[in-house]
Image (cartoon, rainbow, N blue to C red):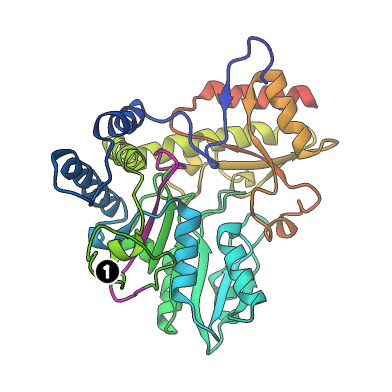
Amino acid sequence: MAASGAVRRYLDNAATSWPKPAEVWEAWEHAGRSIGVAAGRATYREAVVADTIRTRCRDAVARLLGGVDPARVAFPAGATLGLNMAIHGLLRAGDHVIATAADHNATLRPLHALRERGTIELAIVPCDAAGRVDPDAIARAWRPATRLVVCSHASNVTGAVQDARSIATLAHARGGLLLLDAAQSLGQIASEGSGYGADIVVAASHKWLLGPAGTGILWVRPGIELDPLVQGGTGSASDSLAMPERFSDRMEAGTPDLPALAGLLAAVEWIESQSIERTGQHCRGLAATAAAGLGECSGVRVIGPYANKDGPTGGDRFAEERVAPIVSFTVDGYDPGEVSVLLEQIAGVQVRSGFHCAACIHPHLGTQAGGTVRASFGPFNTGDDVDALVEAVQQLR
């Protein structure tokens, strides 16, 4: 609980964005209360409306991914499921996979499980002390059997953004593919070209896309087919025991979460109305200002791209830079968990602490003892939230 009378200052947007635009909850509630049916299952009026919402949501996500084919966009029940669908649906016995130390457990754990079963071989390449991965390290790890590179586009610990286009070019030149976990980038970093240049992109609705939980995004470029991880009813080709040929149907067995899709549609349209570039600049500016202030506090170590003090301080330096609005730090004499509790008690500042579901990055950051304190800034945060964070940390010191 926050200290009595303290304003709630939510700085955990990398986990789940909050608050959401009002339009998101209005669309979510309307779909649940007034439509209340399954998309793609019938022809009565509400069912047609439901299917229209799902189609419009595919179109909106396809625009955000750089104008990809909406027919290649599917909506799994979250990014973790989408990543598992991609990994298990693509890989075969004997494949070699390259992942990175900056990746999230949503990819590393399924890959580890396949390696433990003896299905694949796995190489995890290192990152630097900011969480960046050198594409040359991926080139050095390449083997004749390498089929797939898996990469978190932006680190959920430091905010470092990987050079997805260079990694994709490297993989394609060797006959491989790139699976991009865009949970920390889609919604606040614009896609240059189709799907950031990757072959498969997965993202969460409830993070930087500002949508509700309950759905995620799986885009697969034409020419790549996945074996469905889940089989079942789709509302199409129901007279056959085989899964349908159409990509979205094959990937979406079961009843879709219509309120979640309606909310995601409203969220993407809100992002488009605000401009993804402008929203991203606002969030990165807050993160940079917070990092600069924290860096002036005695005994505080800022970790990641924002720790570099070269050039002007504040938001200007990072306005155009490809970095996520995430600031990790440690405070001498305190466990990160203690810091997070005290920040809420002192000033109502809500941050995350620990290892952030990233098992391999912390030895490279020097934070393997207890992880970090992480503040992540969304479009509804303000400079007052930054000031409250920095002042509360100063009180600790």
Residue 342 part of the magenta-drawn span: no
Q: Position of residue 104 (x, y in %)?
A: 59, 57
The answer, for residue 297, to whether it is visible in the render is no
Assign the N terminus to one quadrant of the image: top right
Corner quadrant of residue 165: bottom left
Q: Nearer the viewer, residue 370 or 114?
A: 114
Q: Is residue 216 left or right of residue 336?
A: left
Q: Find the residue positioned furthest to the bottom.
A: 144
Residue ID at (29%, 76%) = 223
Count the labels in the image. 1
Q: Position of residue 18 (x, y in %)?
A: 48, 31
Residue ID at (59%, 44%) = 306
Q: Nearer the viewer, residue 73 or 165?
A: 73
Q: Position of residue 81 (x, y in %)?
A: 48, 57
Corner quadrant of residue 94: bottom right
Assign the C terminus to one quadrant of the image: top right
Q: Is residue 395 above or below residue 366?
A: above
Q: Position of residue 372 (x, y in %)?
A: 71, 44
Q: Identify residue type, mark 1.
A: Pro
Q: Find the residue positioned furthest to the top.
A: 5
Residue ID at (46%, 53%) = 79
Q: Find the residue positioned furthest to the right.
A: 333
Q: Main secondary structure of the magenta part?
A: loop
Q: Is residue 343 left or right of residue 137?
A: right
Corner quadrant of residue 33: top left
The answer, for residue 101, to whether it is visible in the render is yes
The residue carrying mark 1 is: 244
**Region of the chain picked out in magenta, as a range:** 206-225
- Give the class, few, some or many, for how many residues have Cα within 10 Å of label 1's Cα (few <14, many ≥20): some
Q: Secondary structure at mark 1?
A: loop
